[in-house]
Amino acid sequence: RAETITVFAAASLKTALDGIVADWNAETGNTAVVSYAGSSALAKQIQEGAPADVFISAAVNWMDTLEEGKLIRPGTRVDLLGNSIVLVAHGAEAAPVEIAPGFDLAGMLGGNKLAMALVDSVPAGVYGKAALMSLGVWEAVAPKVAQADNVRAALALVATGEAPMGIVYATDAAAEPAVSVVGAFPADSHPAIVYPAAVIAESAKPEAEAFLTYLSGAKARAAFEGQGFTVLEK
Amino acid sequence: MTLSVRLTHRFGGFSLDAAFEAPMGVTAVFGRSGSGKTTVINAVAGLLRPDAGHVALDGRVLFDSSRKVFMPVHRRRLGYVFQEGRLFPHLSVRQNLDYGRWFAPREEGAGFDHVVAMLGIGALLDRRPGGLSGGEKQRVAIGRALLAKPRLLLMDEPLAALDEERKAEILPYLERLRDETEIPVLYVSHSMAEVARLATTLVLMEAGRVVRAGPAADVLSDPDSVPALGVRTAGASLHAIVAAQEEDGLTRLQTSAGPLLIPRVEAEIGARLAIRIPAQDVILSRNRPEGLSALNVLAATVTAVRLGEGPGAIIQLRAGEDLLLARVTRRSALALELAPGVACFAILKTVAVAQTNVGGAG
Amino acid sequence: MTLSVRLTHRFGGFSLDAAFEAPMGVTAVFGRSGSGKTTVINAVAGLLRPDAGHVALDGRVLFDSSRKVFMPVHRRRLGYVFQEGRLFPHLSVRQNLDYGRWFAPREEGAGFDHVVAMLGIGALLDRRPGGLSGGEKQRVAIGRALLAKPRLLLMDEPLAALDEERKAEILPYLERLRDETEIPVLYVSHSMAEVARLATTLVLMEAGRVVRAGPAADVLSDPDSVPALGVRTAGASLHAIVAAQEEDGLTRLQTSAGPLLIPRVEAEIGARLAIRIPAQDVILSRNRPEGLSALNVLAATVTAVRLGEGPGAIIQLRAGEDLLLARVTRRSALALELAPGVACFAILKTVAVAQTNVGGAG
Amino acid sequence: MLDAVPGGLGAALSPDEWRAVTLSLKVSFWATVLSLPLGVAVAYALARHEFWGKQALNGLVHLPLILPPVVTGYLLLLTFGRKGMIGGFLDQSFGLVFAFRWTGAALTAAVMAFPLMVRAIRLAIEAVDPKLEQAASTLGASRPWVFATVTLPLILPGVIAGAILAFAKAMGEFGATITFVSNIPGQTQTLPSAIYSFLQVPGGDAKAMQLVLIAIAIALTALFLSEWVGRSVARRIAGS
Amino acid sequence: MLDAVPGGLGAALSPDEWRAVTLSLKVSFWATVLSLPLGVAVAYALARHEFWGKQALNGLVHLPLILPPVVTGYLLLLTFGRKGMIGGFLDQSFGLVFAFRWTGAALTAAVMAFPLMVRAIRLAIEAVDPKLEQAASTLGASRPWVFATVTLPLILPGVIAGAILAFAKAMGEFGATITFVSNIPGQTQTLPSAIYSFLQVPGGDAKAMQLVLIAIAIALTALFLSEWVGRSVARRIAGS
Ligand SMILES: Nc1ncnc2c1ncn2[C@@H]1O[C@H](COP(=O)(O)OP(=O)(O)OP(=O)(O)O)[C@@H](O)[C@H]1O
Ligand SMILES: Nc1ncnc2c1ncn2[C@@H]1O[C@H](COP(=O)(O)OP(=O)(O)OP(=O)(O)O)[C@@H](O)[C@H]1O
Ligand SMILES: [Mg+2]
Ligand SMILES: [Mg+2]
């Protein structure tokens, strides 16, 4: 008997997840439909009783909130994916930058802006700010930060040359030909970048857990890695 | 059916305080520009809620400030011909004409084709009001009001935009309306010819007040109302019966003062007519004149003489059972020694009795 | 200054094909409702771009379809009094009146206070047009046009919404305008009294065509134009010189046919006047009548007799150097054996010469 | 019908994308049609009546214009969601569910477009000469009849303008919709939501632009249609 | 001035939030004021003239209504950014920079609000009787004079309505603004951006709602003011 499950997923997962869902549908005969939106909107919708079966968040804090609210099925939460943040610069062949404590990012920017996602609310921005703080350069850079409402918008600012540099996910940077990655932030300079996933408490469909399992499978792993994510081991 | 009106109302600098009765027939409201005629008619229509007063049509109360009665406009069943047409721009002429019929009872009344033919608007039926000339618009507005089969017709200078011939064509229809139906008409006009022809009752207004009101014949033949009417518009009416249709295009009438010849009137022999004789169209003579082109000479007796402030005098005459007014110069009045009781002859040109001055006896 | 007009234009079912010259003075355009009067005036104003034709004012080309000249409205310097007022609702009466003055040259012309007093709108100056009565609106519209100091005045039934007295007050001003300034006036009216009094030139229209045009005196005294004018509006003009102001309120005039007494006219002794005598106010007699209240008897000779289709006849008379028209019944015409060459007397009531029929000699 | 659109644009769209297009049309259509009577009524009340709470109503109508769409969507989620006050009531009483259904998308679109619709209609009503309405009532027409036979036909161009404006707005509405009903393909994924999804991932721009062009084409068609209708109505009124 | 607002709301706001409030006011004000003349001109052209490309202009004006705001913001970035065609030109020729400046936020707000403004004004113009304009021209007024002395005063209520609508829309604009000029506290962080930020983190709702109330208060004040002005203008016209 074919079943339809609804997956709420962070918008940045779309490319990889669309492929995986197509495979899963074909293999199982079930149907998974994915609603892509910002993690905060999806989480709030789940709080309001959205008919979701699986939630894949880009923000740990929203998954924590749902868990505290007993809105996810106990024991189903997994840290599905990992990502990293990188410093990008405008142009296909920008010179690499060595990212180390106290590096002169502010000096490199001069009078220009550093594009990031919202540093207090959007995960990529939060991670980026944490990294700059731990490297001791936030104070100097803060006035030069232009915050976009999501990573893609931040990337667009660099791609158009509006801002010479930006901090974005490695996954996003890789696919944009108009920018080049000039440096990666050390993994220990910021909290681990994790995409948690879980089955929603109200979901009555066994297929939801099966889908979650499938996401950790080999085929899915290949698809995620193809987009630059790291698939975290359980 | 009788309309009774008692109103007071204030606008900024203007205050209205008017009361009159409008019996069956046409009640003309006559007065200068700004004297409050439209205001009165709007209050009767319910478009204006006056400060105080009482309006009743045939016993049915339309407005009573003391009892807080105010009947909504659409329930009053009036036909209002506005000073400025107010045709519906989005409807064709035909649809404009039909508008009131949706709400009118199915009872018989003026037929569509009849009204259209009478007003000469047959060729316009499929046009929109936007492209009509001023007179065409007003004719359609009259038709629209008539076809709503109203219990009271309100007309605010309905013919002002029409040419004389068109007026002469429409007036008889308004007369027939007056005579054949039981619809009272409240009629505002600047034209004394119209008023005198149509009005059975006359209300003279000045600065928001009614200065004279009463049966039109009385008001018009009273020398004292001449100042209010304006000297050039005064005149009285003769009652007459159609005696014969002569072959040279004249109609012979019988009045209590003798025979009268006027341009042909389409009326049955024996029909009763009222002939308005403007005071300034009457010439007086002490002895019976001979060899004049004027065909009508009536024997009369002077009943009153009113010398005006200017060079004129108004002479009231009894001719048979009717009263006539004649306007002559003060000089002639003295020369002819006109005084109450004096016998004289009133000379009247046949052609001076215009179509607009002949009406069915009101 | 001369306005020359030659136009053709089509609207759906209506086609206009009119040509006339309007010299200095007042050119009245007269015709039934829907005959195309407003269309002509709009084309002159530039509000309508006719299909073809040529309009020039005093040699300045306003429109020429062959040369593709179309002068924009605001450069034509016209004063247009519209059939429906068209006051600016957002401006006070004073600001409405002042509107055209912004664009008018500073040269002298009708003064503000003068125009306001003449039109009796002094009390309205600070009001908005919204609350004005119909007649009040029209008076303000006239004032606004006059104060724009136009090179040509276009008036589309400007007095239709006014009462007789107000008309009588405004008409002399329009006459003075005609006589004292060099502004030609194109004047549309349904009222022959107005037209006859004001017009120096008359253009009769019927169904989009000019059926007669020429000096008003000629057109009006020509028995052949009676059908086009309407029998009741025909009449001719006598030229006269003020001879004396009598003490009983009459003015004695000298005409080429003899003396004439009319109600007092405020004019200098020696002033030239034109007196319109409506055809239906004239009584004819073969022998000099005695003892009548009518004070004016002029010796005359019949020059033409035109029997109408109805019971009437129009008699053209020569009285001194002027032509007169008299409307009598066919029966009287036969009884008095009126025929060209016959001598007779024209009887005229003094009071029949109304203020509106006396004009400065045009 | 839409599948018949030949070549280029159509051929390259996935079934989900096609569904987003048709869903957007459906949502915008119903949002416009169903809110129109209310829009006319509110516009009439605001234009022609004085009543207690008029300014409050006026403010309420305009709120969606003033608030960031996300906020409006969130407020809708809180009130019309299944756990929300009104949403819960409607669900239990009439089985009418908005949350995460296309009906919710329509509700959102209607709410977001409402101020535009009301403004346009209200201006049209204010331009109707009350003297014409008076004339109709003297001919025997009661208030509702006057409205139906005189006011409504005269404001038709304004109503059409308002409706099309609302339709266009509904076609473009995104922030509130995705916040309230999420972005579930085939159920609540409208064209703008689909565009958003593509803009969120690397390499999605081309696809997004393709959908943007479709959105523009639809909205402009509606717009030009309304211009044409409005003009022919105006011409009819001006006289044949 | 705004700092003087006593107690409650004001007291609880951080300096950055205050700056967002004042910036939003500044951005909306200038966006409205500066686009108004163009709005009137475009509305007049659309209402009263036939010209080549009229429908294209009409479509262009409406685009921001139809497009998801992100797309509009992105297109603005491409054209008015410093590397963009127009933006680069303006920068080099006049030193006028939009990117990351409040001027850019104002430009975005103006663009987004433009269709609303034009619609409102256009409807008002269409309601003016051309016969009054004709009357003015017979009195010697040239086209521009007629416009200034007759048309403009008569459409004033519509212009005010359009301006306030635009102002309200500008106060609420978020998606296009943040995409084009991003969110730099004190420079381009408008009230909606601040609200959005709070909505992105768990537990930020209360703070967001506080800002929402401020936005509502400002926009409604403008709205009621416009109602009042519009009404008193209408009353003046109807006759004292
Ligand atoms: N709404 C209003 N506000 C202020 N004054 C008004 C209003 N309506 C009418 N008036 C004034 O009341 C007076 C009477 O106006 P009304 O329209 O009744 O005159 P009317 O006798 O019909 O004049 P006309 O013959 O010129 O039409 C006028 O002085 C007019 O200015
Ligand atoms: N825009 C238009 N479209 C179609 N027909 C028109 C238009 N304007 C005028 N007409 C027609 O042209 C004819 C002449 O109209 P016009 O307004 O010139 O008449 P008029 O002589 O001024 O009449 P009135 O004395 O009634 O004002 C009428 O039959 C009218 O219906
Ligand atoms: Mg009146
Ligand atoms: Mg006309």
Image: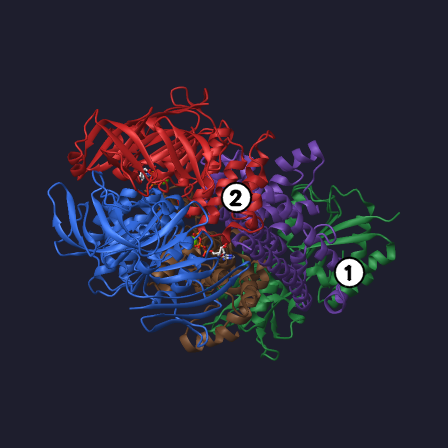
Chain colours: A green, B red, C blue, D purple, E brown
- Judged left or right of residue C341, residue D36 is right
Residue D148 visible, this orientation: no
Point out the tag, 2 or 1, that comes first from the N-terminus.
Answer: 1
Nearer to us in this view, E181 or C101 = C101
Is disc 2 placed on a helix, strand or loop?
A: helix
Give the spatial CA distance, label 2 vs label 1: 37 Å
The correct choice, above or below, for B309 with respect to B84 in the image is: above
Where residue B76 appears, as percent x and y from the top left, is 49, 28
* Total marks in image: 2
The correct choice, above or below, for C113 with respect to B243 in the image is: below
- Judged left or right of residue C138, residue A27 is right
Where residue B357 appears, as percent x and y from the top left, is 39, 37
- Judged left or right of residue D151, residue D31 is right
Nearer to us in this view, B136 or C305 = C305
The correct choice, above or below, for E137 with respect to E89 in the image is: above
Is disc 1 placed on a helix, strand or loop?
A: helix
Give the labeled residue for mark 1: D3
Give the labeled residue for mark 2: D61
Q: Quadrant of residue B229?
A: top left
The label number, if any, that marks residue E77 in the structure image: none
Residue depicted at x 45% and y 66%: C49
**Chain letter, disc 1 residue:** D
Pick the quarter of the image with the N terminus of chain C: bottom left
Residue B274 visible, this orientation: yes
Sort mark 2 into few (<14), some (14-19) or many (20+) by Cα contacts within 10 Å. many
